[in-house]
Amino acid sequence: MGGLAALAREAGHQVTGCDAGVYPPMSDQLRALGIELTQGFGAEQLALKPDMFVVGNVVSRVHLTDGNPKFPLMEAILDAGLPYTSGPQWLAEHVLAGRHVIAIAGTHGKTTTTAMISWILEFAGLQPGFLVGGVPMNFDVSARLGAGKTFVIEADEYDTAFFDKRSKFVHYRPRTAVLNNLEFDHADIFDDLAAIERQFHHLVRTVPGAGPHGSGRIVVNGLEESLARVIHAGCWSEVRSFGAAVSDFTAAGEPHEFDVLLQGKVVGHVKWALTGVHNQLNALAAIAAAQHVGVAPDVAAQALAQFENVKRRMEVRGIVAVGGGTITVYDDFAHHPTAIRTTVDGLRRRLGPGERILAVFEPRSNTMKLGAMKAQLPWSLEQADLAFCHSGGLGWDAREALATMGERAHVADNIDALVSLVKANARAGDHIICMSNGSFGGIHQKLLESL
């Protein structure tokens, strides 16, 4: 929604917005753009008299225990019969119409891959528009309209709004669709993996056909059985696969430096600062998508050498000198067990012998709060030397879920206690990754100060 606000501002509209507890980097970006932020969802905001209310999917018709609505502003909009729309619908009608849309869908890596493709197209001189669910450091803004024909958008499978339960990405009508991976997630709105696969197939149905009368391409991860089922349910577009040994686009080499192969022939070489097999796969997806709009794979590989990732993706927040060595503190957005595992594994591959990884995390997403994936946590933390879990607000027992990790796991129900636990166990040479899809109570700075 912050990126959408930035696009509306750039298009010449006066924009205001409201939310509860907006935090950096988005809060900083909005202020810098001159977008006024109102704290909370009070009905008095009707006095602003906007021409359109763009409603995010956090808003609902829920009533609190005292009988009052949780979102009084929404109730006031409905009572007054004022115009409102969803974020994805507003984008489709005012930003995406007439553009070559490249949409990046998947359980993991959407933000990073969207940023990669945007940077590749920028490097190639195509001046793309983009909307990224984070702040890509090559641009320092999360969204812009762009002067070119292409628009790159992070395509989320979460539902659109309380009045539109379709996945957001159904609104975007891409000409190039990236299906990066697909696992069960969003247990608060999806019953099972099949329900999410159905939404992904709805996206596939919106992509133009292949052949002389069509120009649509679907870029699909060849390692994922779930995506094979999605394509098998019906596909009308050109398909380019990546990742598996028999895919169109494959990689040879380590994640930090590798050759890019197209149907077995080397077409580019990537050497960059990123780590992890997941980022190697993201790169292949980005190269395949960029090729569809005319960027040669070798040019895309050159662009990736200058790719700086997205804020809160293994972002170094500080290095502290202690006891003849250093401790490094990272911030990462990982919150799904698979994302936690790939993040920790990516760092492990980069470290030398004796260097430890301390994984500090909070199960904050709706799916994790429900405990739907708690059994996967020990697996996700396998490569960490020590794990520290923030258990505040959970309806399940984190200690029990992590019991198989023995003395490697530590649990605290508030941030200060968690910081104390980490400090008591940290030593020179350690790498501390703080993983959350929220602000995590400012734990990164608290750790740096405490250490």
Image (cartoon, helix red, strand yellow):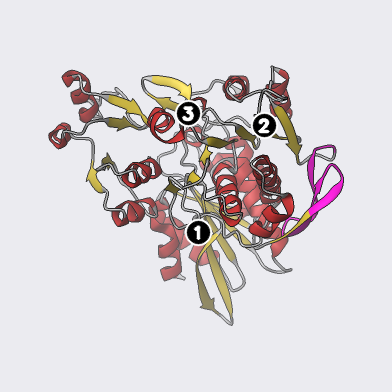
Q: Is residue 198 left or right of residue 333?
A: right
Q: Residue at x 62, y 34 (%)?
A: 176
- First to last magenta residue range: 246-267
Q: Which residue is mark 3?
A: 168
Q: Amino acid at mark 2?
A: Arg
From the image, state whether disc 2 or disc 3 is nearer to you.
2
Q: Quadrant of residue 257?
A: bottom right
Q: Is residue 351 left or right of residue 365?
A: right
Q: Which residue is mark 1?
A: 137
Most extreme residue toward the right is 264
Q: Quadrant of residue 415?
A: bottom left
> Eyeballing the image, is 423 above or below 410?
below
Residue 141 on the magenta segment = no
Count of number-bearing discs: 3
Counting from the top left corner in percent of width and height, residue 261 is at 81, 48
Q: Quadrant of residue 106?
A: top right
> Eyeballing the image, is 126 above or below 273?
above
Q: Residue at x 62, y 72 (%)?
A: 429
Disc 1 from disc 3: Cα separation: 25 Å
- Counting residues from the start of the chain, the first of labels 1 and 3 encountered is 1
Q: Is residue 125 visible?
A: yes
- Counting residues from the start of the chain, the first of labels 1 and 2 encountered is 1
Give SS at disc 2: strand
Counting from the top left corner in percent of width and height, residue 89 is at 40, 27
From the image, state whether disc 1 or disc 2 is nearer to you.
2
Task: Specify the principal SS of the magenta part.
Answer: strand
- Residue nearest the viewer, comparing 34 with 297: 297
Counting from the top left corner in percent of width and height, residue 307 is at 60, 59
Q: Amino acid at mark 3?
A: Lys
Disc 2 from disc 3: Cα separation: 19 Å
| Mark 1 neighbour density, 10 Å: few (under 14) some (14–19) many (20 or more) | some
Q: Which residue is mark 2?
A: 217
